[in-house]
Amino acid sequence: MATRIRELREEYKMSQIRLSIELEVSQEAVSAYENDKNFPSVPLLIKMSELFNASVDYILGISDIRIAIDSDNLTNDKKNLLIKYDKLNNNDKMRLMGYMDSLIEN
């Protein structure tokens, strides 16, 4: 968990002090979370989840999936895309992601 909090904080270019202000805790508390010396409460985890747009499971290190997908809201096209994506090997997944990035940029 500590690693994820630090990674997310750094990704969002936040200092420990800035995160402590957002969470309404001390900078020492944030440092303790990042060093596994203390654990944030459930309300703080929810606040971090909203702040970093990441699931609580991801922040806790339970899951490597950053954002939970509500499958009830997925169209059939999106579901089929995910099924096909899962069948690709890692190299082909990377190639596909590169191709999609180039489509988005143009």
Image (cartoon, grey):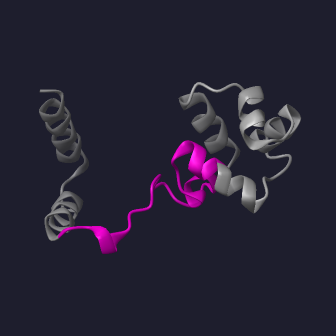
Q: Is residue 84 above or below residue 18?
A: below
Question: Residue visible at 64% across and 27% down?
Answer: 14
- Where residue 2 sits: x, y (%)? 70, 44
In the picture, measured across the screen, residue 46 lies left or right of residue 97, that is right
Question: Residue visible at 11% across and 27% down?
Answer: 106
Question: Residue visible at 70% across and 25% down?
Answer: 15
Question: Residue visible at 58% across and 50% down?
Answer: 50
Q: Which residue occupies the extreme bottom position in the image?
A: 72
In the picture, measured across the screen, residue 7 lies left or right of residue 68, that is right
Q: Give whichever of 17, 7 is nearer the camera.
A: 17
Question: Any magenta on residue 56?
Answer: yes
Question: Any magenta on residue 106?
Answer: no
- Where residue 22 sits: x, y (%)? 72, 38
- Where residue 23 sits: x, y (%)? 75, 43
Q: Is residue 43 above or below residue 105?
A: below
- The span shown in magenta is 48-75
